[in-house]
């Protein structure tokens, strides 16, 4: 079979002084929309608000249309997103990467990694070589030998949770699913989809699983196996459930290793904790681990990685003659582009680059927490976390402007690799100024969030006095 050329549709642009000064995003803009005025987009003004939903209609070809062209619509959309990058603080997505321009030529091919990543397809348009390289990298990170694991690149953390919990259910059909109330919502979705009995475990004020409540509920159901979802970085507070404490609790409650299955949901922190401690390791009796690839590492498309023990996967594997492969995945057809993006990112950064990202994010999270605390704002930061939880801003427009996630009286900022000190300073400055208006320069009181983030982290008048004057 002849080699595939990537050059015809994506010719290199002549390198002029102007193009050398352009960013990868602006170069991509010129390649994609050569017939549109590609002047540098206006910088967002300090008062620029969140983008409005576009009121679009599908424009049938051949019909008269007096509106803007397709290219102009897309260029305006691209410019808006580019401006809003500096106000993306509330959700775990790393939008700091430039390799999309390098990998853009691959978009001219349909790449489908259908079926088992370790078995060849009957067609050549797949990226399983890249996928296996990525899986091998994570297998080494999480301390399991290449011949002992099975895994695949998923469409995101939710699919990884659905797969890991399904494995537990197939291995232990009578098992009960245990998950903390701060677990990702997809864990409880899995329980509903698979019609599993489940127990919701209480959490401490920092979001970590309450191990005494876990113990009590394990003892109540001692006649049935346990399938436990362990969260390595809870969605809102960034708390880390302690795998070792959970394993010790299972042992104390009389559960042998053939009577429990542990799935680790490490969507955000699965790339961080191995460089800090060995909490995630298949040397321990865990069953599966999943991460989201678009979160800490970064990818233009949602994606993830799921790793389990090879001895477990036969419980899900089905021989599919049509694709000449075995399939044990949730989705069947899978995006063949995402493994290449993950492979490229891991190769370009390496472990040293990731360690630098981790240290910078942890330092910036502490910086944000300290600055907010100094400003008299209620704030909490868990150990080894990049999620800074603070009192919920009173103004919905402020929340939308900074794209914050809010629960009850709390909001949070997730300090991802693309978040700079300048962005944090702008956020802090604006928040402090807005609070003066919301609380009339101290005449009105800020909400008490002691029950949500702990009395020691609450800056309301009651707790402030309580902790200043013991």
Image (cartoon, grey):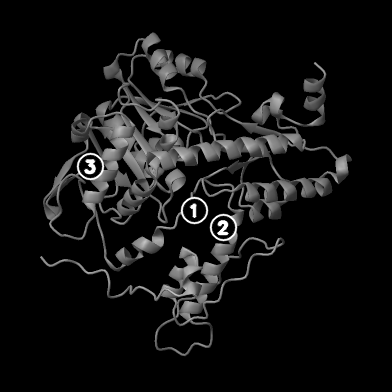
Q: Indicate the quadrant where residue 432 lies.
A: top right
Q: Is residue 296 visible?
A: yes
- Name the disc covering residue 85, or none: 2
Q: Is residue 72 above or below residue 424?
A: below
Considering only order in the chain, which callout, 1 or 2, is on the residue closer to the N terminus? Answer: 2
In the image, 151 versus 221, the foreground residue is 151
In the image, what residue occupies the spot 70% across and 55% down?
397
Crowd band around label 1 with a 10 angstrom C-alpha radius: few (<14), some (14–19), many (20+):
some
- Judge left or right: residue 403 versus residue 136: right
What is the secondary structure assignment of the residue under circle 1? loop
Disc 2 + disc 1, Cβ < 8 Å: yes
Disc 3 + disc 1, Cβ < 8 Å: no
| Mark in the foreground, 2 or 3 | 2
Q: Which residue is mark 1?
A: 95
What is the secondary structure assignment of the residue under circle 3? loop
Considering only order in the chain, which callout, 1 or 3, is on the residue closer to the N terminus? Answer: 1
Residue 287 placed where, x, y %? 30, 28
Quadrant of the drawing holding the C terminus: top right
């Amino acid at each position: 079979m002849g080699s595939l050329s990537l050059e015809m549709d994506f010719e290199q642009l002549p390198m002029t002084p102007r193009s050398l000064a352009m960013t990868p995003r602006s170069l991509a803009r010129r390649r994609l929309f050569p017939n549109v005025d590609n002047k540098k987009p206006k910088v967002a003004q300090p008062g620029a608000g969140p983008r409005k939903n576009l009121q679009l209609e599908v424009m049938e070809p051949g019909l008269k249309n007096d509106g803007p062209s397709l290219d102009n619509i897309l260029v305006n959309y691209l410019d808006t997103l580019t401006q809003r990058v500096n106000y993306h603080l509330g959700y775990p997505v790393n939008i700091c990467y430039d390799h999309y321009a390098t990998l853009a030529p691959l978009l001219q091919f349909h790449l489908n990694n259908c079926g088992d990543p370790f078995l060849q397809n009957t067609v050549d348009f797949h990226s399983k070589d890249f996928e296996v390289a990525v899986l091998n990298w994570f297998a080494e990170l999480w301390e399991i030998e290449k011949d002992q694991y099975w895994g695949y690149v998923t469409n995101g953390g939710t699919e990884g949770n659905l797969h890991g919990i399904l494995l537990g259910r197939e291995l232990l059909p009578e098992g009960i699913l245990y998950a903390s109330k701060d677990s990702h919502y997809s864990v409880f979705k899995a329980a509903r989809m698979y019609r599993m009995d489940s127990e919701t475990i209480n959490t401490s004020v920092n979001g970590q699983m309450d191990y005494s409540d876990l113990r009590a509920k394990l003892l109540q159901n001692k006649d049935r196996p346990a399938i436990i979802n362990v969260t390595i970085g809870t969605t809102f507070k960034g708390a880390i459930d302690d795998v070792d404490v959970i394993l010790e609790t299972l042992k104390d409650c009389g559960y042998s290793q053939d009577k429990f299955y542990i799935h680790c949901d490490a969507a955000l922190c699965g790339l961080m904790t191995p460089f800090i401690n060995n909490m995630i390791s298949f040397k321990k009796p865990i069953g599966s681990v999943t991460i989201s690839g678009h979160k800490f590492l970064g990818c233009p498309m949602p994606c993830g990685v799921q790793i389990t023990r090879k001895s477990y996967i036969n419980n899900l594997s089905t021989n599919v003659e049509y694709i000449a492969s075995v399939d044990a995945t949730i989705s069947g057809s899978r995006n063949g582009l995402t493994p290449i993006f993950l492979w490229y990112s891991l190769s370009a950064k390496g472990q040293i680059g990731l360690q630098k990202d981790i240290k910078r994010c942890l330092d910036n999270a502490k910086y944000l927490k300290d600055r907010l605390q100094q400003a008299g704002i209620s704030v909490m930061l868990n150990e080894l976390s990049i999620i800074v939880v603070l009192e919920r801003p009173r103004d919905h427009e402020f929340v939308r402007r900074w794209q914050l996630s809010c629960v009850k009286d709390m909001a949070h900022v997730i300090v991802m690799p693309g978040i700079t000190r300048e962005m944090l300073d702008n956020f802090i400055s604006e928040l402090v100024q807005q609070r003066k208006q919301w609380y009339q320069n101290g005449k009105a009181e800020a909400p008490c969030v002691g029950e949500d983030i702990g009395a020691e982290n609450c800056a309301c008048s009651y707790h402030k006095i309580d902790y200043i004057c013991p």
